[in-house]
Amino acid sequence: MNEKKDKLELARKSPEATNPFGMMRRFTRDMERLFEDFGGFRFPSVFSSEALPFPTEFEEMDWMPQVEVLHNNGQFMVRADLPGMTKDDIKVELANDMLTISGERKAEKEEKREGFYRSERSYGNFYRQLPLPEGVITEKAEATFTNGVLEVTMPAPKAEPATRKLEVKDAPAVKGQAKAAA
């Protein structure tokens, strides 16, 4: 029982536990193992990484920026927190009614003291893809980057649903029903 508890603690402390895509990778490995040979039947590998639409993006992704989506005063706005980055580190694309924000985060810290030197570097790709609501005017989209916050705005007129009121009429009487009613 203690060995099982130790394995659970190790799983919680693994880097996969803090990254949602890492958790999905661990889940898919567990599911593959479960269905590997189920009662003598061989199931196809539906959980393999080759089945993912773009597996390399998921494998290389180390960090997922926080994103806020707003629809206010006829404007559709997306804000992404990208601390420590510059506008040159970020790529913003609009295609097929999707907004894609991607890039690479690079951080280097260096500390020098008497008889002591420490240098840390961390790198990580990120990729966020958000569906755009119907009616946004992507041709007028703008992106700005200020103090680590990317803001993408585009006009999105409030779409009024097309409604029509129908008059309810009496159904026409059928000849056979008129005699029976009399």
Image (spheres, rainbow, N blue to C red):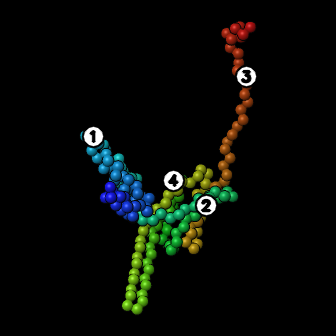
Please give the residue where the numbered disc 4 appears in the rendered image. 96
Label 1: element kind? loop
Which of pointers 1 and 3 indicates the residue nearer the eye?
A: 1
**What amino acid is found at the position of numbered circle 1 in the picture?**
Gly
Residue 35 in picture, x, y percent from top left:
31, 45
- Crowdedness of circle 1 by 10 Å Cα count: few (<14), some, many (20+)? few
User: Disc number at residue 100?
Assistant: none
Please give the residue where the numbered disc 3 appears in the rendered image. 170
* 29 sits left or right of 81 in the view: left
Q: Is residue 118 above or below residue 79?
A: below
Q: CA distance from mark 2 to mark 3?
A: 49 Å
Identified at 67% across, 9% down, the residue is: 176
Quadrant of the image occupied by residue 110: bottom left
Q: Which callout, 2 or 4, points at the residue further toward the start of the chain? A: 2
**What amino acid is found at the position of numbered circle 2 in the picture?**
Met
Q: CA distance from mark 2 to mark 4?
A: 18 Å
Quadrant of the image occupied by residue 74: bottom right
User: Disc number at residue 77?
Assistant: 2
Identified at 72% across, 10% down, the residue is: 181
**What amino acid is found at the position of numbered circle 3 in the picture?**
Asp
Residue 147 in picture, x, y percent from top left:
57, 74
Q: Is residue 173 above or below residue 124?
A: above
Q: Is residue 137 visible?
A: yes
Q: CA distance from mark 4 to mark 3?
A: 47 Å
